Image: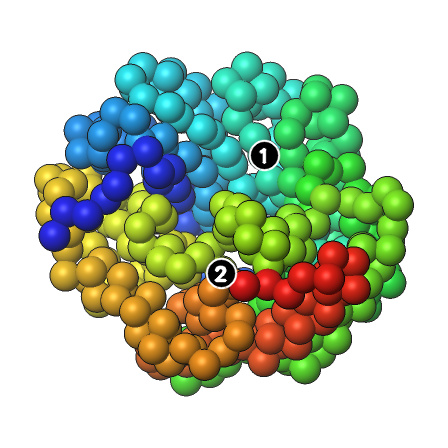
Amino acid sequence: MDFYPPGETVTVLAITSNSCNMDCSYCFRDHSAVETLSFEVFEAYMKNMDSYFPRETPLCVIFHGGEPLLAGYSFFNKAFKFLDSLDRPIYKGMQSNLTMLDDKLIELFKKNECSIGGSLDGDEEINDQTRRFKSQKGSYAAVTEKLHKLKLAGMYTGVISVLHDFNMDAQRYYKFAKQVEAYQVGFSPMFEYRNSISSCTDPGKLAQFLIDLFDLWVADDNPPKLSFFEEIMHSMLGKNPGKTCTFHEDCTRGMMAVNVNGDVCLCNHFLGMKEHCYGNAAITPFSEIWNSVQRESLSRRSSQMATLCKDCEYNSICHGGCMSHTFKSFASRDYFCKAYRLLFAHIEEALVAVTGMAHD
Protein backbone atom coordinates (compact mmCIF):
# COMPACT_ATOMS: atom_id res chain seq x y z
CA MET A 1 0.00 0.00 0.00
CA ASP A 2 1.80 3.07 -1.29
CA PHE A 3 -0.04 5.94 0.44
CA TYR A 4 2.62 8.63 0.94
CA PRO A 5 1.09 12.00 -0.07
CA PRO A 6 3.35 14.37 -2.04
CA GLY A 7 4.32 17.66 -0.48
CA GLU A 8 4.48 16.60 3.18
CA THR A 9 7.87 16.73 4.85
CA VAL A 10 9.57 13.45 5.72
CA THR A 11 11.89 13.64 8.73
CA VAL A 12 14.90 11.33 8.64
CA LEU A 13 16.76 10.81 11.90
CA ALA A 14 20.16 9.87 10.52
CA ILE A 15 21.78 8.04 13.43
CA THR A 16 25.33 9.21 12.92
CA SER A 17 26.79 7.42 15.92
CA ASN A 18 25.50 4.91 18.44
CA SER A 19 28.32 5.91 20.77
CA CYS A 20 28.66 8.91 23.06
CA ASN A 21 31.40 10.81 24.84
CA MET A 22 29.14 11.38 27.84
CA ASP A 23 27.62 9.18 30.55
CA CYS A 24 24.23 10.65 31.46
CA SER A 25 22.63 8.92 34.42
CA TYR A 26 19.34 8.13 32.67
CA CYS A 27 20.71 7.05 29.28
CA PHE A 28 19.54 3.59 28.17
CA ARG A 29 22.06 3.16 25.34
CA ASP A 30 25.08 0.89 25.46
CA HIS A 31 28.00 3.09 24.45
CA SER A 32 30.73 0.52 25.00
CA ALA A 33 31.25 -0.06 21.26
CA VAL A 34 32.18 2.83 18.97
CA GLU A 35 29.81 2.72 15.98
CA THR A 36 29.66 5.61 13.54
CA LEU A 37 27.89 6.10 10.23
CA SER A 38 30.07 5.85 7.14
CA PHE A 39 29.47 8.27 4.30
CA GLU A 40 29.04 5.31 1.92
CA VAL A 41 26.09 3.90 3.91
CA PHE A 42 24.55 7.38 4.30
CA GLU A 43 24.86 8.05 0.57
CA ALA A 44 23.36 4.66 -0.28
CA TYR A 45 20.24 4.99 1.84
CA MET A 46 19.68 8.65 0.98
CA LYS A 47 19.89 7.86 -2.75
CA ASN A 48 17.39 5.07 -2.13
CA MET A 49 14.95 7.46 -0.43
CA ASP A 50 15.50 10.13 -3.05
CA SER A 51 14.49 7.71 -5.79
CA TYR A 52 11.25 6.85 -3.98
CA PHE A 53 9.70 10.05 -2.64
CA PRO A 54 8.20 12.58 -5.09
CA ARG A 55 10.47 15.51 -6.05
CA GLU A 56 8.21 17.97 -4.24
CA THR A 57 8.44 16.07 -0.93
CA PRO A 58 10.90 17.87 1.37
CA LEU A 59 13.32 15.77 3.39
CA CYS A 60 14.35 17.02 6.82
CA VAL A 61 17.59 15.22 7.71
CA ILE A 62 18.45 15.37 11.42
CA PHE A 63 21.84 13.99 12.41
CA HIS A 64 21.28 12.20 15.68
CA GLY A 65 22.95 9.78 18.07
CA GLY A 66 24.44 8.78 20.47
CA GLU A 67 26.64 11.75 19.84
CA PRO A 68 26.60 12.56 16.10
CA LEU A 69 29.78 14.65 16.17
CA LEU A 70 31.77 11.47 16.77
CA ALA A 71 31.40 10.93 12.99
CA GLY A 72 33.89 13.78 12.47
CA TYR A 73 34.32 16.79 10.19
CA SER A 74 35.05 14.80 7.04
CA PHE A 75 31.76 12.89 7.26
CA PHE A 76 29.65 16.02 7.66
CA ASN A 77 31.50 17.86 4.90
CA LYS A 78 30.78 15.02 2.47
CA ALA A 79 27.20 14.58 3.72
CA PHE A 80 26.33 18.26 3.22
CA LYS A 81 27.78 18.29 -0.30
CA PHE A 82 25.80 15.20 -1.18
CA LEU A 83 22.53 16.55 0.25
CA ASP A 84 22.98 19.76 -1.71
CA SER A 85 23.21 17.70 -4.90
CA LEU A 86 19.70 16.27 -4.48
CA ASP A 87 16.98 17.86 -6.60
CA ARG A 88 14.43 18.44 -3.85
CA PRO A 89 13.87 20.66 -0.79
CA ILE A 90 16.28 19.59 1.96
CA TYR A 91 16.35 20.81 5.55
CA LYS A 92 19.29 19.96 7.77
CA GLY A 93 19.65 19.75 11.52
CA MET A 94 21.61 18.05 14.27
CA GLN A 95 20.77 17.08 17.85
CA SER A 96 23.97 16.95 19.87
CA ASN A 97 25.31 17.34 23.39
CA LEU A 98 27.49 20.10 21.78
CA THR A 99 30.58 19.32 23.84
CA MET A 100 32.64 18.26 20.80
CA LEU A 101 31.68 21.29 18.73
CA ASP A 102 34.63 23.46 17.65
CA ASP A 103 35.02 26.61 15.56
CA LYS A 104 35.73 24.65 12.36
CA LEU A 105 32.54 22.61 12.77
CA ILE A 106 30.49 25.71 13.61
CA GLU A 107 31.70 27.32 10.37
CA LEU A 108 30.80 24.18 8.41
CA PHE A 109 27.32 23.88 9.90
CA LYS A 110 26.61 27.59 9.42
CA LYS A 111 27.79 27.51 5.80
CA ASN A 112 25.43 24.61 5.14
CA GLU A 113 22.47 26.16 7.00
CA CYS A 114 22.21 23.26 9.43
CA SER A 115 20.32 24.10 12.62
CA ILE A 116 21.72 22.69 15.85
CA GLY A 117 20.03 21.50 19.02
CA GLY A 118 21.79 20.92 22.31
CA SER A 119 20.90 19.27 25.60
CA LEU A 120 20.68 20.78 29.07
CA ASP A 121 18.42 19.71 31.93
CA GLY A 122 18.40 23.06 33.71
CA ASP A 123 20.83 25.36 35.47
CA GLU A 124 24.36 24.21 36.35
CA GLU A 125 23.52 22.57 39.67
CA ILE A 126 20.54 20.69 38.22
CA ASN A 127 22.11 19.73 34.88
CA ASP A 128 25.33 18.43 36.37
CA GLN A 129 23.51 15.93 38.57
CA THR A 130 22.51 13.91 35.50
CA ARG A 131 24.35 15.08 32.38
CA ARG A 132 27.99 14.23 33.00
CA PHE A 133 31.10 13.18 31.13
CA LYS A 134 32.51 9.72 31.72
CA SER A 135 34.87 11.32 34.23
CA GLN A 136 31.67 12.32 36.09
CA LYS A 137 32.41 16.00 35.51
CA GLY A 138 29.26 17.97 34.73
CA SER A 139 28.59 19.21 31.19
CA TYR A 140 26.87 22.56 31.86
CA ALA A 141 29.93 24.80 31.46
CA ALA A 142 31.02 23.09 28.24
CA VAL A 143 27.54 23.20 26.68
CA THR A 144 26.78 26.83 27.56
CA GLU A 145 30.17 27.83 26.12
CA LYS A 146 29.22 26.22 22.80
CA LEU A 147 25.74 27.80 22.87
CA HIS A 148 27.37 31.20 23.28
CA LYS A 149 29.65 30.55 20.30
CA LEU A 150 26.68 29.47 18.20
CA LYS A 151 24.80 32.63 19.16
CA LEU A 152 27.77 34.80 18.21
CA ALA A 153 27.89 32.96 14.87
CA GLY A 154 24.22 33.79 14.26
CA MET A 155 23.18 30.13 14.32
CA TYR A 156 19.66 28.82 14.94
CA THR A 157 19.89 26.78 18.13
CA GLY A 158 17.52 24.98 20.45
CA VAL A 159 17.88 23.21 23.76
CA ILE A 160 15.99 20.13 24.91
CA SER A 161 15.66 18.79 28.44
CA VAL A 162 14.73 15.43 29.88
CA LEU A 163 12.21 15.98 32.68
CA HIS A 164 12.90 14.00 35.85
CA ASP A 165 12.71 14.32 39.63
CA PHE A 166 15.69 16.68 39.84
CA ASN A 167 14.46 19.42 37.51
CA MET A 168 10.65 19.61 37.79
CA ASP A 169 10.65 22.85 39.77
CA ALA A 170 8.69 25.17 37.46
CA GLN A 171 10.04 28.45 38.84
CA ARG A 172 13.63 27.29 38.60
CA TYR A 173 13.23 25.68 35.19
CA TYR A 174 11.49 28.76 33.80
CA LYS A 175 14.34 30.97 34.99
CA PHE A 176 16.73 28.63 33.16
CA ALA A 177 14.60 28.75 29.98
CA LYS A 178 14.65 32.56 30.08
CA GLN A 179 18.41 32.79 30.52
CA VAL A 180 19.78 30.03 28.27
CA GLU A 181 21.23 31.27 24.96
CA ALA A 182 18.92 29.36 22.64
CA TYR A 183 16.13 30.28 20.24
CA GLN A 184 13.73 27.78 21.77
CA VAL A 185 13.56 25.32 24.66
CA GLY A 186 11.90 21.92 24.50
CA PHE A 187 11.42 19.13 26.99
CA SER A 188 10.34 15.53 27.17
CA PRO A 189 9.48 13.39 30.22
CA MET A 190 11.83 10.56 31.06
CA PHE A 191 10.39 7.24 29.96
CA GLU A 192 12.34 4.05 29.72
CA TYR A 193 11.00 0.51 29.67
CA ARG A 194 13.32 -2.38 28.99
CA ASN A 195 12.91 -6.01 30.02
CA SER A 196 10.02 -5.22 32.40
CA ILE A 197 12.10 -2.57 34.19
CA SER A 198 10.76 0.97 33.95
CA SER A 199 12.20 4.38 34.76
CA CYS A 200 9.61 7.07 34.21
CA THR A 201 8.71 10.57 35.29
CA ASP A 202 5.78 10.51 37.70
CA PRO A 203 2.63 11.61 35.76
CA GLY A 204 1.20 13.53 38.72
CA LYS A 205 4.39 15.52 39.23
CA LEU A 206 4.65 16.07 35.48
CA ALA A 207 1.11 17.49 35.32
CA GLN A 208 1.74 19.96 38.13
CA PHE A 209 5.09 21.00 36.65
CA LEU A 210 3.62 21.63 33.19
CA ILE A 211 0.64 23.55 34.56
CA ASP A 212 2.87 25.73 36.72
CA LEU A 213 5.29 26.26 33.85
CA PHE A 214 2.47 27.22 31.50
CA ASP A 215 1.15 29.78 34.00
CA LEU A 216 4.59 31.39 34.25
CA TRP A 217 4.96 31.40 30.48
CA VAL A 218 1.53 32.81 29.62
CA ALA A 219 1.84 35.59 32.22
CA ASP A 220 5.24 36.72 30.92
CA ASP A 221 5.36 39.79 28.66
CA ASN A 222 8.64 38.56 27.19
CA PRO A 223 8.49 34.77 27.36
CA PRO A 224 11.00 32.28 25.98
CA LYS A 225 9.89 30.21 22.99
CA LEU A 226 8.32 27.04 24.42
CA SER A 227 6.87 25.42 21.30
CA PHE A 228 5.29 22.62 23.37
CA PHE A 229 2.71 25.07 24.72
CA GLU A 230 2.42 27.02 21.47
CA GLU A 231 1.43 23.93 19.51
CA ILE A 232 -1.20 22.88 22.04
CA MET A 233 -2.78 26.34 21.98
CA HIS A 234 -2.74 26.47 18.19
CA SER A 235 -4.42 23.05 18.04
CA MET A 236 -7.14 24.20 20.42
CA LEU A 237 -7.71 27.31 18.32
CA GLY A 238 -7.99 25.22 15.17
CA LYS A 239 -4.84 26.56 13.54
CA ASN A 240 -3.57 23.03 12.80
CA PRO A 241 0.18 23.69 13.18
CA GLY A 242 2.94 21.19 12.53
CA LYS A 243 2.88 19.06 15.65
CA THR A 244 5.64 17.46 17.64
CA CYS A 245 5.78 13.72 17.09
CA THR A 246 4.31 13.14 20.59
CA PHE A 247 0.90 14.44 19.54
CA HIS A 248 0.97 13.57 15.84
CA GLU A 249 -2.00 11.64 14.54
CA ASP A 250 0.22 9.18 12.67
CA CYS A 251 3.96 9.70 13.12
CA THR A 252 4.72 6.77 10.81
CA ARG A 253 3.68 8.90 7.81
CA GLY A 254 6.52 11.36 8.09
CA MET A 255 9.19 10.03 10.43
CA MET A 256 11.89 7.42 10.37
CA ALA A 257 15.23 6.71 12.01
CA VAL A 258 18.05 5.07 10.09
CA ASN A 259 20.71 3.31 12.13
CA VAL A 260 24.42 3.42 11.34
CA ASN A 261 24.14 0.17 9.35
CA GLY A 262 21.14 1.36 7.29
CA ASP A 263 18.39 -0.38 9.29
CA VAL A 264 15.18 1.68 9.34
CA CYS A 265 12.71 1.98 12.20
CA LEU A 266 10.12 4.52 13.32
CA CYS A 267 12.36 6.67 15.56
CA ASN A 268 15.33 6.50 17.88
CA HIS A 269 13.20 4.84 20.59
CA PHE A 270 12.87 1.79 18.31
CA LEU A 271 16.56 1.37 17.51
CA GLY A 272 17.73 -2.20 17.99
CA MET A 273 14.19 -3.64 18.12
CA LYS A 274 14.47 -6.19 15.33
CA GLU A 275 10.77 -6.98 15.40
CA HIS A 276 10.02 -3.37 14.42
CA CYS A 277 12.76 -2.89 11.83
CA TYR A 278 11.36 -1.99 8.39
CA GLY A 279 14.43 -3.33 6.58
CA ASN A 280 17.84 -2.04 5.51
CA ALA A 281 17.61 1.05 3.30
CA ALA A 282 21.22 0.79 2.19
CA ILE A 283 20.51 -2.43 0.28
CA THR A 284 16.70 -2.87 -0.03
CA PRO A 285 14.47 -0.96 -2.51
CA PHE A 286 12.81 1.80 -0.54
CA SER A 287 9.35 0.89 -1.76
CA GLU A 288 9.74 -2.35 0.22
CA ILE A 289 10.96 -0.44 3.28
CA TRP A 290 8.15 2.14 3.28
CA ASN A 291 5.45 -0.44 2.57
CA SER A 292 6.80 -3.07 4.96
CA VAL A 293 4.55 -5.10 7.24
CA GLN A 294 6.35 -3.63 10.25
CA ARG A 295 5.64 -0.03 9.28
CA GLU A 296 2.05 -0.68 8.30
CA SER A 297 1.51 -2.49 11.61
CA LEU A 298 2.68 0.57 13.56
CA SER A 299 0.63 2.90 11.34
CA ARG A 300 -2.57 1.15 12.47
CA ARG A 301 -2.17 2.68 15.92
CA SER A 302 -3.80 5.91 14.74
CA SER A 303 -7.11 4.14 14.03
CA GLN A 304 -6.77 2.12 17.23
CA MET A 305 -6.35 5.33 19.24
CA ALA A 306 -9.28 6.94 17.45
CA THR A 307 -11.42 4.12 18.82
CA LEU A 308 -9.82 3.87 22.26
CA CYS A 309 -9.90 7.64 22.84
CA LYS A 310 -13.15 8.46 21.01
CA ASP A 311 -14.83 9.70 24.19
CA CYS A 312 -11.93 11.96 25.18
CA GLU A 313 -12.52 15.64 24.48
CA TYR A 314 -8.82 16.08 23.68
CA ASN A 315 -8.44 13.21 21.23
CA SER A 316 -8.02 15.61 18.30
CA ILE A 317 -5.09 17.27 20.08
CA CYS A 318 -2.97 14.34 21.26
CA HIS A 319 -4.27 11.27 19.35
CA GLY A 320 -3.30 8.96 22.19
CA GLY A 321 0.18 10.44 22.62
CA CYS A 322 3.49 8.77 21.90
CA MET A 323 3.46 5.04 21.18
CA SER A 324 7.00 4.67 22.55
CA HIS A 325 5.65 5.89 25.91
CA THR A 326 3.56 2.76 26.40
CA PHE A 327 4.06 -0.47 28.29
CA LYS A 328 4.12 -3.73 26.29
CA SER A 329 1.42 -2.79 23.73
CA PHE A 330 1.71 0.16 21.34
CA ALA A 331 -2.07 -0.01 20.96
CA SER A 332 -2.50 1.75 24.29
CA ARG A 333 -2.49 5.31 25.52
CA ASP A 334 0.62 7.28 26.35
CA TYR A 335 1.79 6.59 29.93
CA PHE A 336 1.50 10.34 30.55
CA CYS A 337 -2.11 10.56 29.30
CA LYS A 338 -3.53 11.74 32.65
CA ALA A 339 -0.86 14.43 32.94
CA TYR A 340 -1.59 15.73 29.44
CA ARG A 341 -5.36 15.76 29.99
CA LEU A 342 -4.93 17.87 33.12
CA LEU A 343 -2.65 20.23 31.21
CA PHE A 344 -5.05 20.46 28.23
CA ALA A 345 -7.95 21.28 30.54
CA HIS A 346 -5.90 24.00 32.21
CA ILE A 347 -4.81 25.53 28.92
CA GLU A 348 -8.35 25.37 27.55
CA GLU A 349 -9.62 27.20 30.64
CA ALA A 350 -7.02 29.93 30.06
CA LEU A 351 -8.00 30.23 26.38
CA VAL A 352 -11.72 30.40 27.18
CA ALA A 353 -11.03 33.20 29.65
CA VAL A 354 -9.26 35.20 26.94
CA THR A 355 -11.19 34.30 23.77
CA GLY A 356 -14.48 32.91 25.03
CA MET A 357 -13.91 29.92 22.76
CA ALA A 358 -13.29 26.28 23.63
CA HIS A 359 -11.46 23.98 21.24
CA ASP A 360 -13.50 22.13 18.64
Would residue 167 be visible to someone looking at this image?
no
Q: Is residue 112 left or right of residue 347?
A: left
Within 10 Å of disc 1 (Cα), the crowding (few <14, some 14-19, many 20+) is many
Amino acid type, callout 1: Ile
Depth check, front residue: 131 or 60: 60
Would residue 318 be visible to someone looking at this image?
yes
| Residue that lies at the very extreme toward the front in this rendered image | 356
Report x, y in % for residue 111: 55, 15
Report x, y in % for residue 322: 45, 66
Q: Which residue was labeled with disc 1?
A: 116
Residue at 58% over, 19% down: 110
Who comes first in sequence, dot 2 or dot 1?
1
Q: Quadrant of residue 172?
A: bottom right
Residue at 19% over, 38% down: 282
Closer mark to the observer between disc 2 and disc 1: 2
Depth check, front residue: 69 or 58: 58
Quarter containing the C terminus: bottom right
